[in-house]
Amino acid sequence: MKGDLWFQRVSVGTTWFWLAAFALIPNVMVVAASLLERGDRDFIRFALSLESYRRLLDPLYLRVLWNSLYLAALSTLTCLAMGYPFAYLLARVPRRYSRLLLLLVIIPFWTSSLIRTYAIIIILKTRGVVNNILLWTGLIQAPLELLHNDLAIFIGLVYTLLPFMVLPLYAAIEKLDPLLVEAARDLGAGWLKTFARVVIPLTLPGIVAGSMLVFLPALGMFYIPDLLGGARTLLVGSLIRNQFLAARDWPFGAALSVVLTAVMTLLLLVYARSRRLAYRGDLP
């Protein structure tokens, strides 16, 4: 008994130490840096200031934030529209087929996302796979500009983040009791009404979890916009990277990071709320 109690205390203490050292303290340091001034010689000067947050209201940075939110939201909705039917099929097919399909979802994690991004460049470049096929079929007479624009960034985000949407949806749909769907159909509900009033509410935690896992990385990624968007598109992830590594304006970069952290906290609250409503049965 004493050995079990000692092991429990060590395990819990190690976990709390890890969270404090590598999560809590770094976030507190980022918040503190956002409230300081940029130094002439050093990265920061220890003088309280809200100038970094006031700069966020500049139309230039508001446009960058809006473009980032727009692309992240569009990528999330697209991943949801593509991932939900696939996750539903994955959860309902016989297990010998679902294992193979689940393997196909997991395989991209075996390869660096940076390498997969370069693969997209090969596919979308002027003399890439897509343009060569379109030229060969005669659908176009000149190569299309598929790189260095918002479309390329959108394709890269969806391609990279789609598995992060499928897996939470699969976990939620697999727990869905088929008898509830059959009961709704027996009571006269059509397929669409059953889907809207039974399936969607009961799988809402999976939808919110998958949306978080797609939206937040899409909002903060910088290598996909840099490689696929080029210099024409600046998103908030690239802006933060530039402030820390190029401009050396740590307070402003920290303020941008705090904004992303606030968005993440809001989404976590939405996720917790959706789980409570789903388990209590309060969803319509």
Image (cartoon, grey):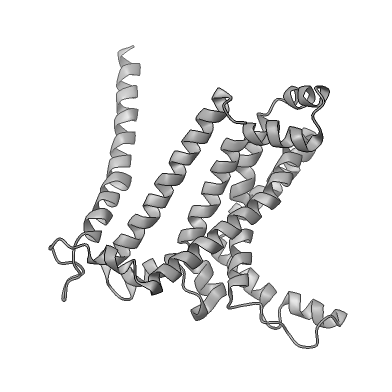
What residue is shown at x 56% (from left), y 25% (from top)?
279
What residue is shown at x 49% (from left), y 64% (from top)?
68
Q: Which residue lies furthest to the right in this view?
A: 137
* Residue 24 sits above or below residue 200 on the image: below
241 relative position to 226: left or right: left
54 relative position to 130: left or right: left
Report the quarter where the N terminus lies: top left
Out of 178 and 51, give the one closest to the viewer. Answer: 51
Residue 92, image x, y percentages: 77, 35
What residue is shown at x 32% (from left), y 41% (from top)?
19
Residue 79, image x, y percentages: 64, 53
Quadrant of residue 70 in the image? bottom right
Out of 80 and 193, give the one closest to the viewer. Answer: 193
Out of 183 and 131, give the one closest to the viewer. Answer: 183
* Residue 256 sits above or below residue 163 on the image: below
What residue is shown at x 33% (from left), y 75% (from top)?
246
Q: Residue furthest left?
A: 47
Residue 17, image x, y percentages: 28, 38
71 relative position to 3: left or right: right
